[in-house]
Image: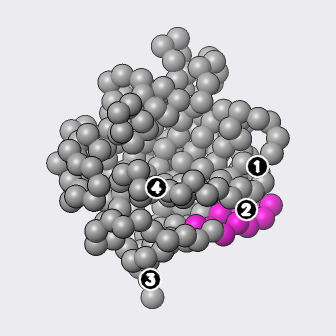
Amino acid sequence: MVTCTRRSWLLGAAATAGCATLPTVPELPGRWLGYAGHRWGIRDDSFPSDPGLNRWAVGRRAVRRGADNLELMSDTDRDGPSGVELWTPISAPLRVEFEVTPQGDGLHPDDVVGLFLYRDGRCEVDIELTRWGTAQGPDTFHTFADRRVRSAELRSSTLPTRHALELSPTHVRLESGSSAGVMVSEAELCACAAGDHVLHINVWRRDERLRPPTRVHVGVAFVSPT
């Protein structure tokens, strides 16, 4: 990648292209926290960068660890929007379960909550909760590296939603659901060595308009396959 994309900061830190061995969280600069039995790196870019030209060095106020969830916050001031992103290495086989609950007035049409795998351009799998700037239409998206996208209206802007990302050595299965419906997608995994992947969670903004902070509670559980 030539331009700074939403995950190029990790690629630069890893000094790799393709499927070389990834660094562990403490080997990278910046902050980290412990949650759900994993160490999570906290993105800490100094300058605005993708997605949405957000700033990613907004201090500890952007992420708070609760008893059973993380509170993540995006905001906008006169310098532009700011987002928060966490990541942790994982390996297949594994099932990761999420509970996402928007706080306050919920997600603005230009808010994005991402639950995704990424380590290079061949290895991207996304669950995204967003309306991509429109007030109506789908609000939950499953996207794979081949750009195949499925979408559903799960009322994720205001309702609690449940999601799962299940990894086998060869496939990934995505599940999203709420009281408004359920969506399931499955695809082959890319050819990364030894099932080594990176799980990310982020909250960010597509627009630059001044508006109140968005707060989202995200619960995460790692479940070994039976």
Q: Residue furthest left?
A: 27
Label located before the other in sequence (1 or 4): 4
Q: Amino acid at mark 3?
A: Pro
Which image quadrant: the N terminus?
Answer: top left
Of the two numbered discs 1 and 3 in the rendering, the one whose residue sits closer to the viewer: 1
Tell me which secondary structure the magenta stretch mostly adopts: strand
Which image quadrant: the C terminus?
Answer: bottom left
Q: Amino acid at mark 2?
A: Ser
Q: Which residue is mark 4?
A: 124
Label located before the other in sequence (3 or 4): 4
Which residue is rendered at x = 65% and y = 63% of the image?
176
Q: Which residue is mark 2?
A: 178
Q: Which secondary structure, mark 4?
A: strand
Q: Which residue is mark 3?
A: 225
Q: Which residues are magenta?
A: 174-184
CA–CA distance between discs 4 and 2? 24 Å
Q: How many marks?
A: 4
Q: Which residue is mark 1?
A: 138
Of the two numbered discs 1 and 4 in the rendering, the one whose residue sits closer to the viewer: 4
Rendered location of residue 65, percent (x, y): 42, 48
Label located before the other in sequence (1 or 3): 1
CA–CA distance between discs 1 and 3? 31 Å
Rendered location of residue 15, percent (x, y): 20, 44
Q: Residue furthest bottom?
A: 226
Q: Which secondary structure, mark 2?
A: strand
CA–CA distance between discs 3 and 4? 22 Å
Which residue is rendered at x = 29% and y = 44% of the image?
11
Q: Amino acid at mark 1?
A: Pro
